[in-house]
């Protein structure tokens, strides 16, 4: 598990992919602190770590990164931690376009592609 406060390269992301899934890296964004937690087996592990360091649940969103893909295929919004009816998100997807855009903005700042 790694916290990305500055930047990493896509090559570093590719190396992380080999740790668990081969072609994919799980990630959680804190949309308030503008940080990413990446490279764990479960989104829930990263979520718990970020909560323990002061993040707020409503700011945490899980997704997957595919370093070999381009465009919309690079990010997959699919995580069990996203199921939060109390935050108006009833599926594993990130349903809010605003939150999706915020996550994409953070990913683009943190990962040099």
Image (cartoon, grey):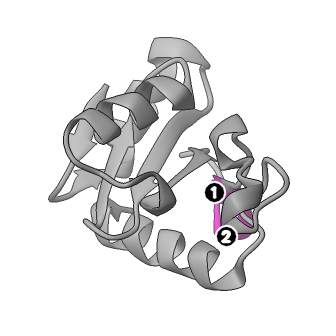
* 54 horizontally vs 59: left or right: left
Mark 1 surroundings within 10 Å by alpha-carbon count, few (fewer than 14), some (14 through 19), many (20 or more): some
In-front residue for pair 91/77: 91
Q: CA distance from mark 1 to mark 2?
A: 6 Å
* 6 horizontally vs 16: left or right: left
What's the mark number on residue 71? Answer: 2
What's the mark number on residue 74? Answer: 1
- Magenta residues, start to end: 70-75
- Residue 93 placement: quadrant: bottom right
In-front residue for pair 73/103: 103
Residue 63 in the image: state x and y as whole percent. 61, 48
Where does the N terminus fall, quadrant-wise?
A: top left
Q: Secondary structure at mark 2?
A: helix
Q: Which residue sits at x=74%, y=47%?
A: 83
Where does the C terminus fall, quadrant-wise?
A: bottom left
* Predominant SS of the magenta segment: helix
Q: Secondary structure at mark 1?
A: helix
Residue 78 in the image: state x and y as whole percent. 74, 46
Residue 46 in the image: state x and y as whole percent. 41, 31
Q: Which residue sits at x=70%, y=82%?
A: 97
- Residue 51 placement: quadrant: top left
108 above or below 19?
Answer: below
Residue 108 in the image: state x and y as whole percent. 40, 71
Residue 100 among magenta residues:
no
Q: Which residue sits at x=46%, y=46%?
A: 28
In-front residue for pair 82/64: 82
């Amino acid at each position: 598990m790694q916290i990305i406060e500055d930047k990493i390269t896509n090559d570093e992301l590719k190396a992380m992919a080999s740790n668990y899934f081969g072609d994919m890296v799980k990630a959680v964004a804190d949309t308030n602190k503008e940080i990413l937690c990446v490279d764990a087996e479960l989104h829930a592990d990263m979520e718990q770590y970020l909560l323990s360091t002061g993040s707020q649940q409503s700011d945490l969103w899980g997704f997957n990164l595919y370093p070999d893909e381009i465009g919309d295929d690079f990010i997959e919004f699919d995580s069990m931690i996203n199921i939060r009816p109390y935050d108006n998100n009833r599926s594993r997807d990130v349903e809010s376009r605003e939150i999706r855009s915020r996550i994409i903005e953070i990913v683009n700042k943190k990962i040099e592609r």
